[in-house]
Amino acid sequence: MTLLLDGHLVQGKNLKVTANLRMESGDMSGQTSNTEKAHKGFKPKTLAITLLIPFVDKDQLRDLMRLAEATAGGGQLHLYRVVNDTAEAFGVRQVEFTDGVSAREDDTLRQWQVQFTLSERQSNPEKVEGRRPGNAVNAQAGPGGTVGGQAGEDATNGAAELTGFEKTLSKLDRWLGGGATE
């Protein structure tokens, strides 16, 4: 089995990939013995990777650490295109390192037991959720005066009268933005 991250081969022996899909749910029973659950969506898929790297091949561990520590613009973790049979079967295309990388010395052989986790980014469910229109939020008003508004402000109008300073700033903003001034 092979693992490629942006075309870079992750080297090591006995490479094992474990794919996970977590489904969030909430208990709706309250204080009863009801077994109803509320589906809260699918969480990003993860790939748990384990492999062995002999001490003589320490450059392989260094290369893996460089991949794990790579950042993109703005200090964000680098997003890798993954090529692996298990990842493909789970529909995972793009990943980033999460939960750290650990390398433990083996008790009997002169090698490291390396473990790390890759988390899916920009998954199909995430893209679908992003395209789905949001629920409309209706403004609600209770009896009495407006909350957070100034006294004398018309609650049905919604537009507040600008102060002289705010009018000047508004004109300056339109002028800088290329809009027409009053």
Image: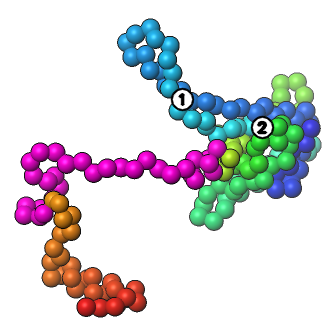
Classify residue 30 as left or right of residue 125: left
Residue 151 painted magenta: yes
In the picture, the disc for residue 90 is 2
**Residue at (11%, 64%) from the top-left corner?**
153
Task: Determine contact: label 2, label 1, CB under 8 Å.
Answer: no
In the picture, the disc for residue 39 is 1
Magenta stretch: give its range: 125-154
Give the alpha-carbon distance from disc 2 to disc 1, as whole Å: 21 Å
Camera sees residue 101: no
**Could you tell me residue 115's position as x and y percent?**
76, 35
In the picture, the disc for residue 5 is none
Q: Nearer the viewer, residue 57 or 91?
A: 91
**Residue at (66%, 51%) from the top-left corner?**
122
Q: Secondary structure at mark 2?
A: helix
Query: Height in image: 110 above or below 59?
Result: above
Q: Secondary structure at mark 1?
A: strand
Camera sees residue 81: yes
